[in-house]
Image: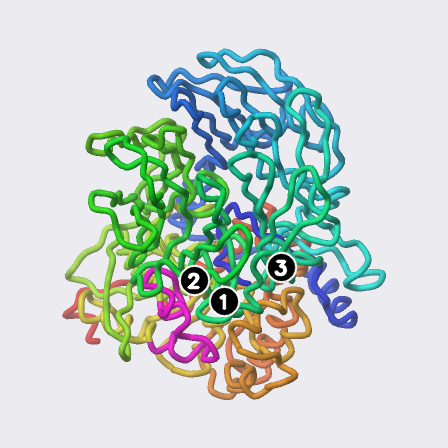
Amino acid sequence: MLIYYAGLSRLRLRPCLFNFCLLSLFTGLSLQAQTAPAAAQPDPRILSVVSTLEKTRSIAQTALSPDGREIAWAVARSGGLELDVAPTDNPSHFQRITAGSGLICDEGHPAWSPDSEQLAFTSNCGSGSQADIYLGTVAGTAAASPRRLTHLRGEIESLDFSPDGKQIGFLYVEGATRHAGALDAMKPPSGIIGIDNLEIQRFASVDRASGETRQISPAALHVYEYDWAPDSSEVAYIAAPPPGENDWWVSQLYIQKASESSPQSILDPGATAGSLHGLQIAVPRWSPDGSQIAFIGGLMSDQGITGGDIYLVSAKGGEAQNLTPNRKSTPVWFYWLTRDKTGSTSPEGQLAVTENKDGALRRVVLNLRGEEVPGGIFDFAGKVTAGTLEGSLSVSKDQGTFAYIESSFVSPPEVKLTRENHHQPETVAVTRVNRSIQPDWGQAQSMDWTSDAYHVQGWLLYPSNYDPTKRYPLIVSVHGGPSSAIVPSWPNLGYNATAFSPLGYFVLMPNPRGSFGQGEAFTLANRKDLGYGDLRDILAGIDAVSAKVPIDKDRIGITGWSYGGFMTMFAVTQTQRFHAAVAGAGISNWQSYYGQNSIDQWMIPFFGTSVYDNPEIYAKSSAINYIKNVKTPTLVVVGDRDGECPAPQSFEFWHALRAEHVPTSLIVYPNEGHRFSAPDHRRDVLERALSWFEQHMPADNQPLQQAGR
């Protein structure tokens, strides 16, 4: 379900089923928001942070050629994404690859042919807003005029050549009218709900030579991820019946002959016994010999936010084997290794796994017994991706080099290249598009503490210009999910926790129980207990921070987006320790939420049952049932077309606070979904949140001897 608001994502969602009276009400509120007075003139430090975030250029994807000699990446520019290619031995000598020279185009999703001679990508240069697949020949950064392969009408993503190089696979939503993403603004409901206006994502392919395009998976299935079989004759994919945004939590693993129209389900977690029962699956990957498929299975909140254990199942179906049942970390992505570090063929096969370990990403090598291979650990500086899933890498054919986009608390996003071969890994920067940008915020430090029987990790961000002789306020920022985690990363323009540091606040970003990073048992630990154990972990984290650095106990605030918005709403009903709060796109009433959102399937794995079978377990975690306890001034913000956390949830919480005479304000942003898209709204929501904390717990930091606290 719910992720912390931040930047680019690939989640998918369908229109929410708002009550029609509430929809009319929020249409009115949104119009009021359009004409509402702007936030008060922000502190110059706020403007500086916003300026830094606005100047940061995002990098959407990167792809390393199989021979390791060329690398492509898609970087933000005016009007969309620009696609650049460079030789890996001289990446500063890059050239733009485009289907429309001299035109403003949006181009990306690079994919190399197995022979490294051609680059496929998407471009809207030739057809206005519609993207199509193009194929260009690349030789030393000089590219022949790309050839248009497709003439489609819909949304395209996830390009990947078949191993024999004859086909280019992709995911396709024919006739798409919007990004079918969980974070994007929902279309107003109309027609027969759940039947009309479905946008179904299917696996399709285009012939590299002729341009013939076929939709291969059936229209009765919404496909989320796929992987070509080694012999190119089959494809494995994870899919569920439409609507796709709601049924990912009950998806199954299918295989299908590329030449046929009927898939075969080889794994259904809902019918599987053991540790995988009722959980989610992602990242299907064929073994090199085509006999098995490995995948990640676990308790996951969102399609696209992956974490769990690694399982192995026969390509003919059968019982899945858990390779990492007791691992104290969370695999998030992996690929098969056919060679070991000496370059020799690995007869058994190994897995190179990107995993979250205590709030940081690293790559490890595991054998098929789940044991770590010595010398296989490589630590990343922060969040990494090749542009698909978090932790994904683009790997050369000899598996000695991998490329990725990396950012951290101190470094904005850049493309990196790591060479392993038989020597110590060597990492070089490929791009320098953000080299002039420096963080406005203070240093970050990993922290560990104990809560109940759990070891808990989090990140502490120091105030800018920290002075240990002064006492500071603290803001706790709770991530979304809950199956997710904070790892070091550069923030995007929009609501983010790092922006509080330049104003003189400590910021604690905890990874409480329910998070990734300490194994599946830790992720499962807040099942049927949302808000309780994770809040105890957070409060224990505040105590740990207060014992380490000078915190003013009368100036502690809490904030979060999505599940973090729920935790903010719930926390202020359970404790008086927080003196200001900002709840972004939160959930105040799990019982009413069940019938309002468009992704109710996600709730069964977390609550163990539907609200109709056990309303008490939903009521137990509903902040609205404890509203009489709230004294904390709370700002509530939401998009009027949010399908993940519908706006009525924010209205209900704000209405109750106002009735109880608690200082509050509700801002509803027009035409916005779970992720805000309009730059002025992304800027405004950040400025208003920062101003709210400045109003109710200002960072007028006093010397310790004068503070008297």
Residue 301 appears at what percent x and percent y? 51, 63
Labelled pair 1, 3 in contact (Cβ < 8 Å): no
Q: Tell me the quadrant of the picture where the N terminus can be found.
A: bottom right
- Local packing at callout 1 (Cα closer than 10 Å; few below 14, some 14-19, many 20+) is many
Q: Which structural element holds mark 1?
A: helix
Distance (Cα) linking label 1 and label 3: 15 Å
Badge 2 marks a residue whose secondary structure is loop
Q: Residues within 10 Å of mark 3 (few under 14, many from 20)?
A: many
Q: Is residue 526 above or below residue 674?
A: below
Range of magenta residues = 512-536
Q: Residue at x 26, y 64 (%)?
A: 472
Q: Amino acid at mark 3?
A: Gly
Q: Which mark is residue 579?
A: none
Q: Position of residue 138 (x, y in %)?
A: 51, 15
Element under label 3?
strand
- State the mark number for residue 563: 1
In the rendered image of this protein, does residue 574 appear above or below residue 110? below
The structure residue drawn at horizontal position 56% and vertical position 88%, both measured from the top left corner, is 616
Tell me which label, 1 or 2, sits earlier in the chain.
Answer: 2
* Left/right of residue 94 with respect to residue 518 in the rendered view: right
CA gap between label 1 and label 2 equals 7 Å
Closer to viewer: mark 3 or mark 2 = 2
Amino acid at circle 1:
Tyr
Disc number at residue 479?
2
Tell me which label, 1 or 3, sits earlier in the chain.
1
- Find residue 198 and report its image quarter: bottom right
Between circles 1 and 3, the one closer to the viewer is 1
Say if 47 sits above or below 430 in the image: below
Foreground residue, 207 or 425? 207
Image disc number at residue 639: 3
